[in-house]
Amino acid sequence: MSFEEYLKPGKFIDSDHPDVIEYANKHVGTGTADTEKTLSLFYAIRDGIRYNPYMDIISPTAYRASDAVKSGEGWCVPKASLMTACLRIHGIPARPGYADVKNHLASQRLLDLMGTDTFPWHSYCEVYLEGKWVKATPSFNLSLCEKFGLKPLDFDGKNDSLFHEFDQAGNKHMDYIQDRGTFVDVPMDEIVKTFQELYRPEYFESVGGDLYAEADAERAAD
């Protein structure tokens, strides 16, 4: 198997961008093994890049790894893009993958804007470690998971870490619908097309929101 294409920079997985290179070197940790480097980068991105679903998802800036570094925030796609880019910088084969899920972490306001509880193209990073591909999902930071009563997704470098199947109380949470597969770079056009077909127009006209404040308000109302 050739890994060359999974080590090169792309339009969105811009591992040749100076900001991404600096970020990757800063957060790779002190370990020498690929698994150690991967785990260090996973947790840095999971908790250090703030999850924000209220982004202009028809703009390329909402998909690029370098823009996640610049803004310090992103939804699942740019966070997975950033992890993929950082791994490639350190010579570890990686590629973005996508799956459709239901009951994704969200506020009621966000669900109302979307008009559905189905989240297509939920993104993860697939990394080649110790002779096999494993999935890691750095989307939801610890502080956000705590607000929604979810266990944060951990990653050990050996087993897939794909989605939040249960909440902290052990109740069924996120449902897996289908895997859309892996790609060399982010398929932005396909993602946007699906969103425009599925989501209400109000979602694209939204002036934004604060998922963290919305979570607090919903919890206070219970």
Image: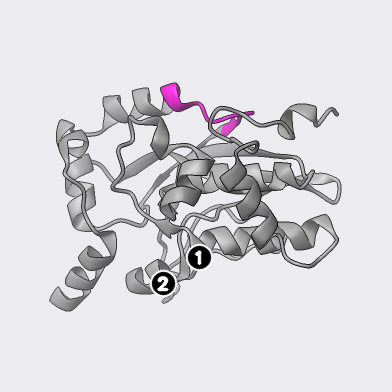
Magenta-drawn segment: 181-190
Query: Quadrant location of residue 143?
Result: bottom left
Q: Mark 1 and 2 residues: CB-CB less than 8 Å, in contact?
A: yes
Q: Which residue is labeled 1 in the image?
A: 47
Which residue sits at x=40%, y=56%? 51
Say which residue appears at 84% left-offset and 27% top-offset.
Answer: 2
Based on the picture, tell me whether residue 183 belongs to the magenta stretch: yes
Q: Position of residue 55 (x, y in %)?
A: 31, 43
The colour scheme used here is one colour
Of the 4 image quadrants, the one containing the N terminus is top right
Q: Is residue 23 above or below residue 150?
A: above
Q: Nearer the viewer, residue 180 or 145?
A: 145
Neighbours of disc 2 within 10 Å: few (<14), some (14-19), many (20+) = some
208 vs 164, left or right, is left
Instruction: Please identify the quadrant where the C terminus is shown.
Output: bottom left
Q: Position of residue 177 (x, y in %)?
A: 45, 41
Of 15 and 200, the residue lying toward us: 15
Give me the residue at 56% from left, 53% from top.
Answer: 137
Relative to 133, is 1 above or below? above
Q: Residue at x 70, y 64 (%)?
A: 156
In this rendering, does residue 84 appear at all? Answer: no
Q: Does the magenta stretch include residue 195?
A: no
Position of residue 94 relative to residue 74, above or below, is above
- Amino acid carrying label 1: it is Asp
Question: Between disc 1 and disc 2, whose residue precedes?
Answer: 1
Question: Residue 172: x and y, percent?
Answer: 42, 63
Residue, disc 2:
143
